[in-house]
Image: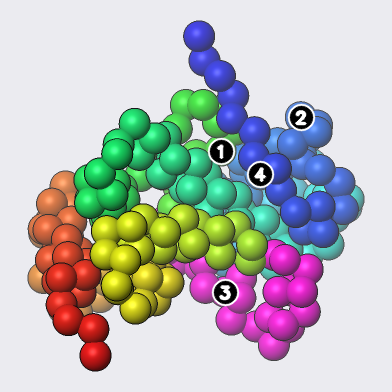
Amino acid sequence: MQLNLRIQMNESLYLRDPESTELGQRIIQNSIELINELGFEGFTFKKLGEYMGTTEASIYRYFENKHRLLTYLVSWYWSWLEYRIIILTQNMNDPREQLNRVVELLSRKIKDDISTTYINEELLQNIVIAEGSKSYLTKHVGQDNQYQFFKPFKELCARIADIIQACNKQYAYPKSLATTLLEMCHSHHYYKLHLPSLTEFAKDKNDQELYSFMQILVNGSLNGANP
């Protein structure tokens, strides 16, 4: 039996809950496909309407602008990723084993999750890797933070940091290591595709080398002496 996963989203991100209607779900599904194809700069609600066979105005009834839509998609991805970590580590008692599973999850490209029928996580990961920083690298980041738009990212990092801290209770930088792990994995996935001279992993088809590299960095940092 297939169970559909529903993630609770910040209501300030949308004007009408896209998960509540068939049209809203189609907006999410098709926006992922089109942003992945065109990039965020080339993406507009007009193009999305044409792609879907609906009106631009109908999309504006769900989202105030395309930046809010991008932030919604990125936030959804962070919450889904935290959910994946919970599922993968729930039966593990050893925090080192938990951390290894987290590193593996973040190092490898995501496959589509069939428990979410209208969201393609594989394409969404591409968007987060290439466009995700645009959700917070803005002049209004402070205001967006007050609206708690970045809470899913903070909660994900906090969960990873807790696992890191459990591995070494004397380690001084669990939050910094958690965010570094996330950002570095995404950066190297981007470099592999677009700037291959910046990494040795361009030919790393199954991400095994990237996974091994991140293991070395994380474990080396945890095992090193604190200043």
The percent position of residue 72, horizontal first and vertical second, equals 67, 56
Q: Tell me which numbered mark, 1 or 3, is placed earlier along the sequence.
A: 1
Any mark on residue 28, and which?
A: 4
How far separated are the C-alphas under marks 3 and 4? 18 Å
Is 186 above or below relative to 171? above
Q: Tell me the magenta residue range.
A: 126-149
Amino acid at the residue labelled 3: Lys
Residue at screen point 47% across, 26% down: 114
- Residue labelled with disc 2: 22
Work out whether residue 217 or residue 134 is closer to the camera in this orientation and state it. 217
* Image marks 2 and 3: residues in contact by CB distance under 8 Å: no
**Residue at the extreme front:** 170
Q: Are marks 1 and 4 in contact (CB under 8 Å)?
A: yes
Q: Which residue is mark 3?
A: 134
* Total numbered circles: 4
Establish if 8 lies above or below 165.
above
User: Residue 29 appears at what percent x and percent y?
Assistant: 61, 40
Label 2 – label 4 distance at C-alpha: 10 Å
* Residue for point 72% across, 82% down: 142
Label 2 element class: helix
Q: Give percent across and percent down for residue 134.
A: 57, 74
How far is disc 2 from disc 3 in space, using C-alphas?
A: 28 Å
Q: Residue at x 34, y 78 (%)?
A: 172
Give the residue number, with chain letter if any, for mark 1: 119
